[in-house]
Amino acid sequence: MNGHRPRRPRQDARNTDITTGSGRPNPAQWFMYAVFGRPLPISMREWVRHDLVGPGAVPRHLIRGLLPFTPIFFAFLLLFPGALWLRASMVLLSVLLALFYTLAFMDLNRARRLELPGLPADLKSDRAQERLSKERATYEKLHGPSRTFSSPISGATPIAGREMDRQRPQRRASGDSTN
């Protein structure tokens, strides 16, 4: 031997998530994902899940939502004539409007981004799932467990709703009037 040990491939700490071992997108992939909504490879499914429902998902969503508008903001600031305060107020108004619509469509955008790699569209964060389970436990403590039965045709239906349907008189067709 010549005294040299074989080199082990160095793992890049920036591109690997410690908890799952899944990769992160490179800057070009992230830009296409963030700005144009392009899907990432299936191998990055855990990264997408963490990005959309993990801690800090809302600030990341706001950044992703404002990123496509930054050229417009700079154009308002640099290319329009007028006093600086007027151009800055145009930018501020534009930022507030973009934030409003970004927040308004956050759930729809998140659902679409979750569906692209095959994740469930109604996936919730751990905090939201914990809050929903607490609400359900409180409801069941106050009102008892919800009773449902399963029908092969209609799926799970609350019993109370079925009993109300049986008690409600059936409407007659308009041609079957027997008055």
Image: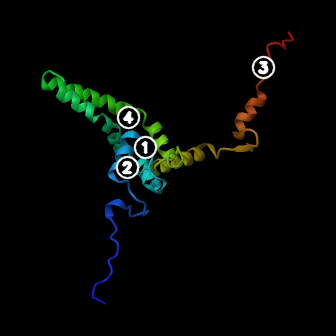
The secondary structure type at the circle numbered 2 is helix
Q: Amino acid at mark 1?
A: Arg
In primary-sequence order, the first of circles 2 and 1 is 2
Q: Are marks 4 and 1 in contact (CB under 8 Å)?
A: no
In primary-sequence order, the first of circles 3 and 2 is 2
Residue designated by label 1: 38
The secondary structure type at the circle numbered 3 is loop
Marks 2/1: CA–CA distance: 8 Å
Q: Amino acid at mark 4?
A: Thr
Marks 4/2: CA–CA distance: 21 Å
Residue designated by label 4: 102
Q: Position of residue 168 (x, y in %)?
A: 76, 25
**Front of the two marks 4 and 3:** 4
Q: Are marks 2 and 1 in contact (CB under 8 Å)?
A: yes
Marks 4/3: CA–CA distance: 46 Å
In primary-sequence order, the first of circles 4 and 3 is 4
Q: Position of residue 110 (x, y in %)?
A: 45, 42
* Viewer-closest of 71 and 155: 71
> From the viewer's perspective, is 161 left or right of 143?
right
Q: Residue at x 42, y 37 (%)?
A: 106
Marks 4/1: CA–CA distance: 17 Å
